[in-house]
Amino acid sequence: TWGRGDAVEQALREVEDSYGSGKSRSIRALCWFLHWGKIGGNTLLAILGRTHRGGALYKSLYVVYYGPLFLIIAVFSRLLGLFPIVPVWVSAGIGVVLTFVAGCWIIPVGFLGVLASLLL
């Protein structure tokens, strides 16, 4: 369903019933964030694997823009495997930092999308 449709809406209502309105909005935002990461990562892998059918300019710009973000995520994921089990607050802190790092790449594109929607 790619994050849309009746089944998703029903699941989100169940989340809201279980966790309340505020937490359910956070959960929904996290789901969209992870969905963006999946699509972005798969697009990057398709470009690097030479299976993406987009134009050369698009693919070049995509790799230049998003490549560093996914490199940071990949390196950090490898480093996490070296650490022992950490307290929950450390894991939560790492999640917050990675979210802000990823946000540095998402926000500019979002602003461009808003600007384009206003101008077109």
Image (tube, rainbow, N blue to C red):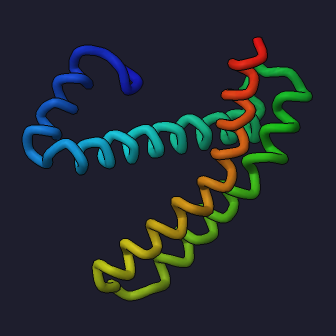
Instruction: State the residue at coordinates (37%, 72%).
Output: 92
Could you say where residue 98 lies in the image, as x and y percent from the top left? Answer: 54, 64
Quadrant position of residue 93: bottom left
Instruction: State the residue at coordinates (16%, 30%).
Output: 13
Q: Which residue of the protein is positioned furthest toward the top in this rendering?
A: 120
Q: Is residue 35 left or right of residue 61?
A: left
Q: Is residue 32 left or right of residue 24?
A: right
Instruction: State the residue at coordinates (24%, 48%).
Output: 22
The C terminus is located in which quarter? top right
Quadrant position of residue 119: top right
Q: Is residue 15 left or right of residue 33?
A: left
Could you say where residue 11 lies in the image, as x and y percent from the top left? Answer: 18, 30
Q: Nearer the viewer, residue 85 or 6?
A: 6
- Residue 55 vertical position relative to residue 120 in the rendered view, above or below: below
Instruction: State the residue at coordinates (44%, 66%).
Output: 95
Q: Which residue of the protein is positioned furthest toward the front in this rendering?
A: 118
Q: Which residue of the protein is positioned furthest toward the right in this rendering?
A: 57
Q: How many marks?
A: 0
- Residue 39 vertical position relative to residue 77 in the rendered view, above or below: above
Could you say where residue 20 lies in the image, as x and y percent from the top left? Answer: 14, 45
Quadrant position of residue 116: top right
Could you say where residue 60 lies in the image, as x and y percent from the top left? Answer: 87, 37
The N terminus is located in which quarter? top left
